[in-house]
């Protein structure tokens, strides 16, 4: 069974979260893994606090946003109202947003170029705050997509560590929409293993069960929890 069998809710509700949780548990059992080995990142981009609050109330504590500006506008209030939340940046990071990103996010999944590394290193030192960092791998080598090419990944990870002094937690990938996800997950896992990285951020609403089979430690699920976004979102 795959996560394609999870029907997105028509609107944000605890039912969507519960269905995703059941599928995660099923996928973990099939893969011989414990449920605790997978972190569900509920992707709340484009949704307001009124849609997010019911999901928090249902027990979800880790959320993902694509843009620093959007997260800054809605999450400080939610974090005050609901202590213990964790916020992850899953979209591209511009180096001029690094100061805000380090202050706001507990994890950044999109480290992918030297300018971002330099900006993050500066802000981590200045703020004495260390978000979990993932290097994004562009496994399909798509020109329109952010991320490091697989062939450049080892050298980039080494530079993160040796030149910028960054602690890299893992890798993130977003497979091409028109290709099977499994080979991309396998490639990302292989790169992580040879670089001694334990965490893999991979898998979304349509393919997170497959990602769990390939070792995903963080899955990024939005529509299956919150419902469909508007076409303009």
Image: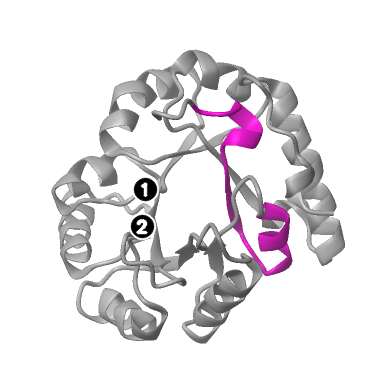
Type of colouring: one colour
Q: Where does the magenta region start and end?
A: 208-229
CB under 8 Å between discs 1 and 2: yes
* Quarter the N terminus occupies: bottom right
The CA span between labels 1 and 2 is 6 Å
Residue 180, given in percent of the width and then of the height, sits at: 63, 66
Relative to 53, residue 174 above or below = below
Give the quadrant of the C terminus.
top left
Number of marks in the rendered image:
2
Q: At 20% across and 49% down in the image, what residue appears?
A: 98
The one nearer the camera, 96 or 185, is: 185
Residue 94's place in the image compared with 147, above or below, is above
| Residue with the mark numbered 1 | 91
> Of the residues under marks 1 and 2, which one precedes in the sequence?
1
Residue highlighted by disc 2: 110
Picture coordinates of residue 147, whole percent (x, y) = 35, 66
Which residue sits at x=31%, y=85%? 155
Asked which quadrant contains residue 167, the reply is: bottom left
x and y percent of residue 165 in the render?
25, 72
Helix, strand or loop at mark 1:
loop
Determine which quarter of the picture holds residue 27.
Answer: bottom right
Q: Which of these two is toward me, 204 or 115?
A: 204
Q: Residues within 10 Å of mark 1 (few under 14, many from 20)?
A: some
At 81% from the left and 40% from the top, the residue drawn is 22
Image quadrant assignment for residue 214: bottom right
Q: Secondary structure at mark 2?
A: strand
């Amino acid at each position: 069974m795959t996560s394609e069998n999870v029907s997105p809710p028509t609107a944000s509700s605890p039912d969507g979260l519960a269905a995703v949780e059941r599928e995660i548990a099923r996928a973990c059992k099939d893969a011989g893994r414990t449920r605790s080995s997978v972190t569900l990142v509920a992707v709340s981009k484009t949704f307001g606090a009124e849609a997010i609050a019911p999901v928090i109330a249902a027990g979800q504590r880790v959320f993902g946003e694509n843009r620093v500006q959007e997260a800054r506008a809605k999450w400080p209030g939610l974090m005050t109202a609901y202590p213990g939340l964790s916020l992850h940046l899953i979209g591209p990071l511009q180096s001029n947003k690094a100061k805000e990103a380090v202050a706001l996010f507990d994890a950044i999944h999109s480290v992918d170029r030297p300018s971002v590394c330099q900006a993050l290193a500066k802000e981590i030192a200045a703020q004495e705050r260390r978000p979990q960092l993932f290097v994004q791998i562009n496994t399909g080598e798509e020109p329109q997509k952010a991320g490091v090419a697989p062939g450049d990944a080892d050298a980039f990870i080494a530079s993160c560590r040796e030149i910028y002094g960054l602690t890299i937690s893992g890798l993130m990938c977003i497979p091409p929409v028109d290709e099977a996800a499994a080979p991309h997950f396998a490639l990302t896992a292989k790169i992580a293993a040879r670089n001694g990285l334990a965490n893999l951020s991979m898998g979304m609403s349509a393919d997170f069960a497959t990602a769990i089979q390939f070792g995903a430690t963080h899955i990024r699920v939005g529509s299956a929890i919150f419902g469909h976004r508007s076409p303009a979102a």
